[in-house]
Image (spheres, grey):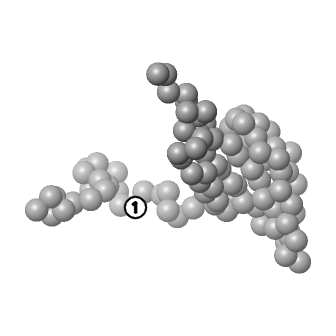
Amino acid sequence: MAHNNHGNEYQVRIVHEDGTEELSGWMNSEEELAQALAKAHRAQGKTYWLRERNVPGSDCVDTEPEIIVECRISDSPSQRYRLHGSASIGADQYSIGSDREAQ
């Protein structure tokens, strides 16, 4: 039996200063999301969130739960994604985990 591919859908949630919220419709592609974000007017007093949910294939709809992940959209780069240290440090310095975990 062939397994249907899973996909993702995207939604933008806008939270206003007064606590009210707006939700976009669910979008089926990253291209649609990029267009929606380009059109959004990022005004002071509003916080923008990206919501992403899995879309199980028809074979899995009864066995796989819907999962929604949400993260804040920011215009400024995150410290989390900047490399620390100099370029002369080897790539192994940035690897996740440690040899101790295998003991």
Q: Position of residue 95 (x, y in %)?
A: 29, 53
Q: Is residue 37 visible?
A: yes
Residue drawn at 53 percent across, 45 percent down: 63
Q: Is residue 81 left or right of residue 97?
A: right
Which secondary structure lies at badge 1? loop
Which residue occupies the extreme left position in the image? 103
Q: Is residue 54 above or below residue 45?
A: above
Residue drawn at 50 percent across, 27 percent down: 3
Q: Is residue 46 visible?
A: no
Q: Position of residue 22 (x, y in %)?
A: 86, 60
Relative depth, front residue between 100 and 76: 100
Relative depth, front residue between 26 and 77: 26
Residue type, mark 1 in image:
His
Q: Is residue 39 above or below residue 4?
A: below
Q: Quadrant of residue 28?
A: top right
Q: Is residue 76 left or right of residue 18?
A: left
Q: Label 1: few (<14), some or many (≥20) within 10 Å?
A: few
* Residue under pointer 1: 84
Relative depth, front residue between 26 and 72: 26
Q: Is residue 71 left or right of residue 15?
A: left
Q: Position of residue 103 (x, y in %)?
A: 10, 62
Residue drawn at 48 percent across, 58 percent down: 82
Residue drawn at 55 percent across, 28 percent down: 4
